Amino acid sequence: GAGVSQSPSNKVTEKGKDVELRCDPISGHTALYWYRQSLGQGLEFLIYFQGNSAPDKSGLPSDRFSAERTGGSVSTLTIQRTQQEDSAVYLCASSFLQNIQYFGAGTRLSVL
Amino acid sequence: AQSVTQLDSHVSVSEGTPVLLRCNYSSSYSPSLFWYVQHPNKGLQLLLKYLSGSTLVKGINGFEAEFNKSQTSFHLRKPSVHISDTAEYFCAVSVFSGGYNKLIFGAGTRLAVHP
């Protein structure tokens, strides 16, 4: 079956612009996670969804970051007023009942 | 607090030789442990997992790992590596906090396999 799908695969934007990153999880997976992979920081947890609700947003780096999930499926991660330090690979993962996490290929964000 | 330490940031070996990638963890309870591999410009692929039971875990592509509770280790090994094993490898522990699980990753080990 299809895996976790993320789009776009690459995004180049100018500092100060808003960006939206999309994640389409594996069908039937109830849990969805966003991580950020950046040089010098490794893999950082950002946010977790169970269904449509996000019980823990504490990993989001600043209030410029937000995420939503609709219909218990697709999720979007929005970064407002992007900064150069937001440049990273944003990875999405999904799992069934919080078990093993399966990752998408990621979105590589470059902020110029 | 739970954490993962990957003891080698870079490993370079010849094709056909064995490789050992080391991982130590700290966890306040019986952990769930994972190894993921990331090829260049790709996402993370699950290699293998330890949830419970047998301490020797076999994964894909000939990789295996051994859970050692007394040494708090979960080292990854392969008896004979191939050029295509060149990638970055991440060890992770699953942490239950706030009513859900999240993964805590090590810093990664870059494996280079040369002819």
Image: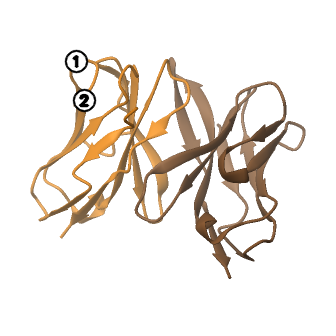
Classify mark 2: helix, strand or loop: loop
Q: Which tint is chain B? A: brown
Disc sitting over residue A74 in the figure: 2
| Few, some or many residues within 10 Å of mark 1 (<14, 14–19, 20+) | few
- Residue picked out by circle 1: A71
Q: Residue at left 23%, top 29%?
A: A68
Which chain does tag 2 point to? A
Tell me how many marks there are. Answer: 2
- Left or right: where A37 falls relative to B112: left
**Which residue extends farthest right?**
B70
Quadrant location of the N terminus of chain B in the rendered image: top right
Which chain does tag 1 point to? A
Q: Which tint is chain A? A: orange
Q: Residue A69 occupies which quadrant of the picture?
A: top left
Please say whether residue B107 is visible from this viewpoint: no
Q: Residue at left 76%, top 25%?
A: B52
Please say whether residue A17 is visible from this viewpoint: yes
Depth order, front residue of A10/A53 = A10
The type of colouring in the image is by chain
Where does the image place residue B101, in percent across and percent down from the top left? 53, 26
**Which residue extends farthest front?**
A1
| Few, some or many residues within 10 Å of mark 2 (<14, 14–19, 20+) | some
Q: Residue A72 occupies which quadrant of the picture?
A: top left
| Kind of residue indicated by mark 1 | Gly
| Kind of residue indicated by mark 2 | Val
In this picture, is B53 found above or below A14? Answer: above
User: Are the residues flagged by discs 2 and 1 in contact, CB closer than 8 Å?
Assistant: yes
